Image (cartoon, rainbow, N blue to C red):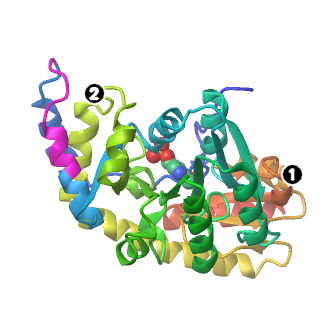
Amino acid sequence: MHAYAIQDSAGLVKLDAMENPYSLPPELQDLLGQRLGRLALNRYPDARVNDLRAALAAYARMPEDYALILGNGSDELISLLALACHMPGASVLAPVPGFVMYAMSAQLQGLAFHGVPLTADFELDESAMLSAIEQHQPSLTYLAYPNNPTANLWDEGVITRVIDAVGQQGGLVVVDEAYQPFAARSWLERLRAQPQAQGHVLLMRTLSKFGLAGVRLGYLMGPKALIAEIDKVRPPYNVSVLNYECALFALEHAQVFAQQAKEIKAQRAKIFQALTALPQVRAWNSEANMILIRVPNAGQTFQGMKSRGVLIKNVSGLHPLLANCLRLTVGTPEENQVMLAALKDSL
Ligand SMILES: *Cc1c(COP(=O)(O)O)cnc(C)c1O
């Protein structure tokens, strides 16, 4: 294996990692700086972390009998879940192509990973999922809602039947809503409506795509008793005082981030429309802050865009279903114009 590769983006328009393109407004930068400066950096993180948990629970409108656990990004939570589930014979299952950390966390923990291919149009393959669940009885099944890199929300009926099947053989389902700020639906509504049937479902979110990728703050919500078990493998003080104070500050100004998400969704629609006018490009509908496209020659288009100063992600090598696919992160209006011009010139 190789270490997680991060592309060098120096001097390029950076549209490769689903980051929010907006920084904090200057007056908020000053306020945050003052707050961070006053923190007791000489002390271990204290009970203020509970204020953040309460603020996140309120922000997400978490159900009453749920609890939440914080992670240093949701990547840490994914690793902790693999650790928590590591019993003899345990395995992890997820649709592929999907988020790479599901397979990587399993591999690093020494657990088997079962990737179940999506259909050619990136929907869940219901019968393949159900038979893989029956065959492997996975401890942990991941469903990214919306999925990365395909950016779509899968059919709710199929997801419900997958969740039921996992529950029948005693496994857990993690619904990963990293892109929730940009999606039309959340699985939380279903959890609230059917708490009994979904008692083995955990809901994971992160502040990364919301606008705080640099802060590293993910959270996992679920029935109290389940979260208490996963909390046993969490390292003490896994979230720094700087992380949680930044996250608290951001939630106090949630309307600033909500406005940014609104702008990003409007830009997503504009980019999508521009893409549909390009006959060599196939674009898929997005419920996230990225758009997956297929071009005649992904390697050539990727390099052409890079030489024109725009960094995107060439995902075509990640899975056969992604042949000649590129992933475009939605940026500011100016960045998107530069990106679209570079794409046209590179096709
Ligand atoms: C980006 C992403 C995450 C995020 O991870 P963080 O560690 O919180 O930055 C999680 N899940 C999916 C599907 C993602 O695309």
Q: Label 2: few (<14), some or many (≥20) within 10 Å? A: few
Residue at point 62%, 57% (across, down):
148
Q: Specify the quadrant of the image occupied by residue 229.
A: top left
Q: Earlier in the sequence, mark 1 or mark 2?
A: 2
Is residue 335 visible in the rendered image? The answer is yes
Q: Nearer the viewer, residue 195 or 294?
A: 195
Residue at point 61%, 73% (across, down):
161
Q: Assign the C terminus to one quadrant of the image.
A: bottom right
Q: Looking at the picture, does residue 136 appear above or below residue 238?
A: below
In the shown orientation, is residue 29 left or right of residue 231? left
Residue at point 27%, 30% (across, down):
240
Q: Amino acid at mark 1?
A: Gln
How far apart in space, not on screen, are marks 1 and 2 (Cα)? 46 Å
Q: Looking at the picture, does residue 184 appear above or below residue 75?
A: below
Residue 217: give x, y in percent of width and height: 36, 43
Q: Specify the quadrant of the image occupied by residue 327.
A: bottom right
Read off the magenta span: 42-53
Q: Assign the N terminus to one quadrant of the image.
A: top right
SS for tag 2? loop
Query: Is residue 45 covered in magenta?
Result: yes
How many numbered tags mark residues here? 2
Q: Which residue is mark 2?
A: 237
Q: Amino acid at mark 2?
A: Tyr
Q: Which residue is mark 1?
A: 300
Residue 140: give x, y in percent of width and height: 57, 48
SS for tag 1? helix
Q: Label 1: few (<14), some or many (≥20) within 10 Å? A: some
Q: Between tags 1 and 2, which lies in front?
A: 2
